[in-house]
Image (cartoon, coloured by chain):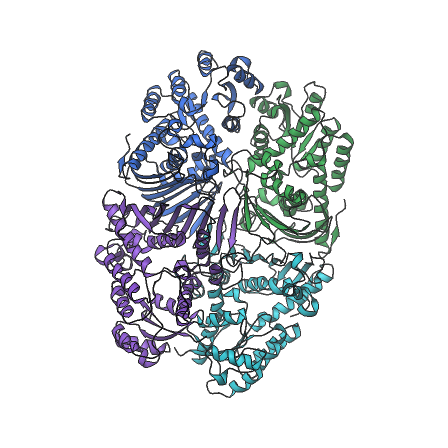
Chain colours: A cyan, B green, C blue, D purple
Amino acid sequence: MTKLSWGIVGGGEGSQIGLAHRMCSALDDKFQFSAGAMDINPERGNEYGVRLGLDADRAYGSWQEMLDGEKNRADRLDLVTVATPNATHFEITKAFLENGFHVLCEKPMTMTLEEAKEIVALQEKTGQICAVNYGYSGYPMVRQMRDMVRQGELGSVRSFVAEFSHGFHADAADADNPRVRWRYDPKQAGISAQFADCGIHALHLASFVLGQNPKKVSADFAACLDSRELEDDALVALRMEDGAVGRLWSSSIAIGRMHGLTLQVFGEKGGLRWAQEQPNQLYWNPINQSVQILERGQNGLSQSSLDASRLTIGHAEGAPVAFANIYKSIAKDIDARKAGKPVGAQDIDYPTAFDGMVSMAAIDATVRSSKADSVWTDLNI
Amino acid sequence: MTKLSWGIVGGGEGSQIGLAHRMCSALDDKFQFSAGAMDINPERGNEYGVRLGLDADRAYGSWQEMLDGEKNRADRLDLVTVATPNATHFEITKAFLENGFHVLCEKPMTMTLEEAKEIVALQEKTGQICAVNYGYSGYPMVRQMRDMVRQGELGSVRSFVAEFSHGFHADAADADNPRVRWRYDPKQAGISAQFADCGIHALHLASFVLGQNPKKVSADFAACLDSRELEDDALVALRMEDGAVGRLWSSSIAIGRMHGLTLQVFGEKGGLRWAQEQPNQLYWNPINQSVQILERGQNGLSQSSLDASRLTIGHAEGAPVAFANIYKSIAKDIDARKAGKPVGAQDIDYPTAFDGMVSMAAIDATVRSSKADSVWTDLNI
Amino acid sequence: MTKLSWGIVGGGEGSQIGLAHRMCSALDDKFQFSAGAMDINPERGNEYGVRLGLDADRAYGSWQEMLDGEKNRADRLDLVTVATPNATHFEITKAFLENGFHVLCEKPMTMTLEEAKEIVALQEKTGQICAVNYGYSGYPMVRQMRDMVRQGELGSVRSFVAEFSHGFHADAADADNPRVRWRYDPKQAGISAQFADCGIHALHLASFVLGQNPKKVSADFAACLDSRELEDDALVALRMEDGAVGRLWSSSIAIGRMHGLTLQVFGEKGGLRWAQEQPNQLYWNPINQSVQILERGQNGLSQSSLDASRLTIGHAEGAPVAFANIYKSIAKDIDARKAGKPVGAQDIDYPTAFDGMVSMAAIDATVRSSKADSVWTDLNI
Amino acid sequence: MTKLSWGIVGGGEGSQIGLAHRMCSALDDKFQFSAGAMDINPERGNEYGVRLGLDADRAYGSWQEMLDGEKNRADRLDLVTVATPNATHFEITKAFLENGFHVLCEKPMTMTLEEAKEIVALQEKTGQICAVNYGYSGYPMVRQMRDMVRQGELGSVRSFVAEFSHGFHADAADADNPRVRWRYDPKQAGISAQFADCGIHALHLASFVLGQNPKKVSADFAACLDSRELEDDALVALRMEDGAVGRLWSSSIAIGRMHGLTLQVFGEKGGLRWAQEQPNQLYWNPINQSVQILERGQNGLSQSSLDASRLTIGHAEGAPVAFANIYKSIAKDIDARKAGKPVGAQDIDYPTAFDGMVSMAAIDATVRSSKADSVWTDLNI
């Protein structure tokens, strides 16, 4: 049980995402925090890394230094997490992949669909792990949904309804707050705001559970505050690769919704319902029977769901554990590779570069549909 | 407190809707069941009416006989309910209105938009009451929502999300059951199935609460069972008259949803959430404050909401009382007219012919959009 | 389908309970409101009765006049409801029973255990119906619980947990309000306040569902407001006739509880949970399986539960319908008697005088235990 | 930000509690796992410790070796966690305290009240930290409740209702399973089963939130399975030091309850309700106003609550974070001591030896009451 060595680019002092990655990578005793390039200011980054317990020579001043320093070490990093500002994800992820590192990249993986396709091509060429941090897929009951679909318990899936809505950008008096404003400014945020920020999590979740990707979309984007250029409320109709019907709503002006990520899946033989705010229960209605409440950790759940569960049934497990499961699943993959075991597609529980690319294609297509009178628009995959 | 006299066309023996109307009209001691033409078979209708306590001469054999018999009586009916098969609503409603009767018509008011416009014109010309039975608007907490919007507690309304989904037409093995099949057959059901049957209730509820009607729509209709021609799942994006954004989902294949009529309304100053399955609570989130749970019957609710409430706070009140409130509101209007009091638009708590016409226009527009690649389509009002 | 004739003692103008009885008796077209002695003031009672549509000669000035007037009529009342102030229930119920009337008495049936035993003896002697209005037992899902216990689905019942708590007497500033104060004054309310008022409903519900009565109790009564002599918060441990363990909590100072009547039943083979505020769902956990949500009106429920259900599944049905079911069940019994059909104990769905007597015995025993250092105290049945 | 050094006694390979302690102590980068005596088998313990990354000389073969090895080191442990079998807690905790270590002891702190008093005396004499792992008090919204009570938002607290019930020992077919059986055998489990195991958590929670301890109890213990000697269902009435009324129910045969730890607190000015299974919401009803839903992390919550919160509002946080908060609070105390800052009683957020002693006194008193016909019995503190 030697620990894997782990390093991070970004996530410096005061960064919540940096703390979350250290917390979640540490949760299972699988990864040892061994290197970092944590700050745009080299000295500050070095000093912070040492304070966190890194050896001084692995508390790097920049990601380039880190790449140079690590690539020739015998004990080089087993996994590099990229948690820098969005616009830099592509360049850093690419560089580490090219040099033979496994990478976990924060979402969004890239700023454009073209870049995303380049990462996918690179990942396929190198065979390295390139994971993308759609952390909600780490929830045990999300994996249970996926496994129930895989095992055919729902029969053919006919439709899904996904939501990710909150109300924390509803206050007009706060709309010019820089913390909020940049998100709706295409110069800073790109072509989409709320759909790219939150909606895409809901769509990934649906794709993850259904085991298939969206094929085409009809989208309605609305900017409910006059001061905004980009959408704060999006409705998207979808068709998946095999024809399944999708409905997705995402809003940031839905006062009263907190962190409203939910998924419902309806098949020939039953329906499922799950909500992130109460993640330990999964509502399962086998057709013509009563609704059942499946509890995290319950006997009879799928192995992947049980593996993602840490405490006995009934304890409230939450997001930190879900996010840690992404690390746990990557560790399992790295361990298998080290042991020379084959890793099939069905064994991969974490989101991949391909998922990151599909997300970029979905954002691209929804924006195009929204601008074209909501006509149906194919994803350009 | 003389009771008003009430009669019904349709709703014969074994009809659930007939029983519901008798139960709901009786609930408040306001209406006396006085006449009926309850069966397509004159003898059966007469016999049944007498068994229910009608005088033999007012247990009519047909609606035409009832119209002839009542129109010349000194004690003619104060209100006629039309609860016959859908295709006959127009003709019967029209005839009674033309002869000076107040009418409560079951939904849908007509089969076409043109007929609906004719009824509206007739209602306006005669000045008679023509109510349409969108009964869910009778729930006390629905009226509370409307009144909070009216009083400006939400500020300008930016958006709403409405749903009405169930899973009782999901079973492929039951799809040929005549009880289900006709609904998805355009020869019998018209141009729309699930949206016209259920979705329109959700849309009426939103319009009722917002105090404004839809202006244009982009719709995606899907028939998730291969055997169906009409939609069993509909997603509709809307813009209301004043620009408010709408999202509406209605499905009959959503296994696990029972009677999933819900409404969320989001304004500048707060958000509301209500669900028919738990109708006595209304979730209200004034912006930047905590979510509050408003309870039916609670001090401080609007007068109209309190008037629609029968039992003290905390008792589960339900649909029969909500439906009875439609009768109660009509009685209030009739009483005011009899007393010579003016009745303004704000005093009318029941759904009207105009609402019935808007519904027909919305069905017409969603069908057109759905067939035209989901492009935005204006309501033809 | 001739209607049964029904009359009421008490429930005059402005009385909520009178309105409720008229509404609930009318709901099913089973009873015709035919006579009343509705006010302590004879003229006011007569005038009000006539206004409600009674014949002038059956709008009586007092219950004695009503008894005299009705007992010799050929079309005498089929059922008399007693809805007068508590202290008069015994006398009036007794008088009507002695004269061959069926009676539905408001709760509490009597003020003392001795009186209650006298009513039970009289009921047994006359064979007349003497029902007591524990109306919550009319909820369809309560009957479903009872029937599941009867049919052995839970195996032997080991324990129950019952609650009936609210917070509407918590305000010290309102404690001297006469509307509240009398309840905690032994001169007016008798030996118990909150337990006798609310707790006893919870205990009846448990007894109804378990099909057995309490045998002994250990009780802790607390008056949480200094100004009170009688309890506003009660905790009671129980043993039922066959040894099942009971836990009961009832409070009127539980701020945040509204109408918190709940029941949980735990047997060898499964557990049930039901709450009055969400009465259409019943949570059923067969041992070693998932929790199931049973919905009112669902296929496979017991006949008695389905009979008590009016609307299709998913509609929110509530308290008025539940209370109407008491009338419906009494009507069924009267009809069977008129038709000469035998009525067995298992056919009786409404609460009886025996239940009313057990309640008085339970109040008596809890008070004695509470005053005696909470020692275990037998019911004196 | 030098890390504190941490060691553990017990929690060897395969132990869930050991994993939980390592996970929770690591979560905040505050503690470095530095020493352990993790197994009753010295070699296995040493080997496992090394595998987990300990230096070989700090992977001890026994707790005595660990005590000897650590007490003379310059870099001796800052905190020792005791996670051994219950019967050994007293001896080990005592030994480490006597030698100047801070200790976090698993619950129960001791097997008898006398031992507990000895630990409290020792803790007071040495001034060392002796924490006891009532981990549920680490939930942010539990701290919020405590702080609202402290700040007088409820006014004087009148009563509380606490529960901790599950159904996982309900299966008679599983009762002889050694994993279950020992708990109900006084030879192995001591004088109480379910109350000592689960009920005591609920009682600690209530005491923590109210800021006061129980003074006397009336208890009813029941063994609902014939094969059991000790109770599997307990009901306890309580009076707290200042007279507040308590009601507590704990069961292990409540099929359908999962991990049903809940607390309701009722004061003069409002009521609170919290449930462990949905720990991120706190229901707060200020008297005569609407119920409010307070969300973990929301603006305006107490500082202690916000400090215990890791993710932004709406994310499901759960038990692992709550348990980690115990470590975080201890670390804060150690850091303050190292910095020479005064630590007042109000600054201590973790449960202490005194709490552990009160728990033993409560178990002792409830058992005595239960055996003495449920008479009221004082805690012997």
Q: Is residue D27 left or right of residue B159?
A: left
**Residue B314: % across, % down:** 50, 39
For the residue pair D290 and C258, the one nearer the viewer reads as D290
Quarter of the rendering occupied by the N terminus of chain B: top right
The number of numbered discs placed on residues in the rendered structure image is 0
Q: Is residue B217 above or below residue A6?
A: above
**Residue A10, located in which quarter of the rendered image?**
bottom right
Quarter of the rendering occupied by the C terminus of chain B: top right
For the residue pair B58 and C145, the one nearer the viewer reads as C145
Q: Which residue appears farthest toward the left when viewing the image?
A: D187
Q: Is residue D375 left or right of residue A235?
A: left
Q: Residue at x 45, y 23 (%)?
A: C84
For the residue pair C305 and C251, the one nearer the viewer reads as C251
**Residue C366: % across, % down:** 32, 35
**Residue D201: % across, % down:** 35, 55
**Residue C136: % across, % down:** 44, 35
For the residue pair D122 and A327, the one nearer the viewer reads as D122
Q: Is residue B31 above or below residue A280?
A: above
**Residue A195, located in which quarter of the rendered image?**
bottom right
- Is residue A127 at least partly visible in the picture? no
- Is residue B188 at least partly visible in the picture? yes
